[in-house]
Image (tube, rainbow, N blue to C red):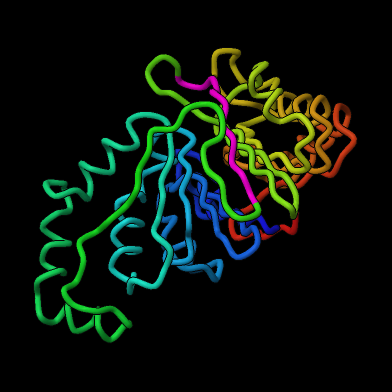
Amino acid sequence: MQLYLICAGTPSPTKTRFGTCYVVRVGPDYLMFDCGPAATWKLTQAGLLPTQMRGLFFTHHHYDHNADYPCFLLTRWNHHNGKEAPLHIWGPPPTALMTERLIGEDGVFADDWKARVNHPASQRVHVERGGTLPRPAPAFVATDAEPGTVAEGPNWKVTAAWGKHADPWLKSLAYRLDSTEGSLLVTGDAIPTESLSRLAQGAETLVVNCWDHSDEMEPEHGISGTLDAGRLAQATGAKRLVLTHSVARLTQPGSRERGIVDIGRLYSGEIVFGDEGMMLDC
């Protein structure tokens, strides 16, 4: 199992990171978690293609987690020749409604895909890519997910639990992936809660959105800091803790080392400070 950190930043763009997006390869399947700014382009920088993605799981619908969603949907559909597996999308409400409003029959991007379906030049390109005519309209299966088993593959299963982040205005989900190759948890922006801890118990790798040094964060911030990440990892018995979604201050030389030291006082496993473009064997 491999973990790709496609986007590892926050809502504030910097030269080296912006937004959230992760991909996990398990067996032949590629599963994508969140779709932050420029995620589609950053996939290609990691040697991946939108058409390889089998499933997309949204943790919540802040723009730094979903802003590239229309680009990803259109790119994947436009380069789909009919031989790739259909894309399934899960996330808290309003995932299904958002998808329909973006790419449905009367969606914001309907004029785009209808032109590509009907224009002779676009039809010719579709055939050259291995497709057949008539060119099909976009077809995606988008589901509003809830806690419990969300999706299953031949050798993997994804389970969700509610997270606490921007309640009550936005619902959030954390996801756990269990497979024959290992287990991994994506917390999203959630702060530590009992439900998150239960979901994480025994997971080998935790991907935790770690905003900043805990002693420099306000209590009502709604996202984990360094000490939150360390306590969660230690309490759940994780072998590896991957820190992402960090503000620029935490990523600077010296500051990140201080964060790792602080976490290391609480957690005895492997600590990985995540950077965009990083690929880890899990």
Q: Does the magenta stretch include residue 115?
A: no
Determine if residue 119 is in view.
yes
Residue drawn 52% across the image and 29% down it: 173
On screen, 257 above or below 24?
Answer: above
Residue 262 in view (yes/no) = no
Split into 4 quadrants, where in the image is the N terminus? Answer: bottom right
- Residue 157 in the image: state x and y as whole percent: 61, 44
Give the total of numbered labels.
0
In the rendered view, tell whether residue 190 sits above or below residue 117: above
For residue 162: magenta?
yes
Tell me what residue is drawn at x 44 percent, y 32 percent.
145
Rendered location of residue 64, percent (x, y): 43, 40
Q: For residue 82, which quarter of the picture?
A: bottom left
Instruction: Farthest residue to the bottom: give it.
Output: 128
**Furthest residue to the front?**
154
Q: Viewed as shown, does residue 116 lie left or right of 60?
A: left
Residue 143, placed above or below residue 7: above
Horizontal side of residue 137 vs 39, given as left or right: left
Residue 267 at x, y percent in the picture: 86, 31
Question: Which residue is located at x 67 percent, y 16 percent?
Answer: 194
Find residue 29 and report its horizontal and vertical position in percent: 57, 60
Quarter occupied by the C terminus: bottom right
Residue at (74% x, 43% y) in the render:
205
> What stretch of residues is rendered in magenta?
156-166
- Give the answer, above or below, for where 108 lies relative to 172: below
Q: Which of 217 and 4 is in front in this view?
A: 4
- Seen from the viewer's position, the closer of residues 28 and 13 is 28
Magenta segment main secondary structure: strand
Horizontally, residue 143 falls left or right of residue 281, namely: left
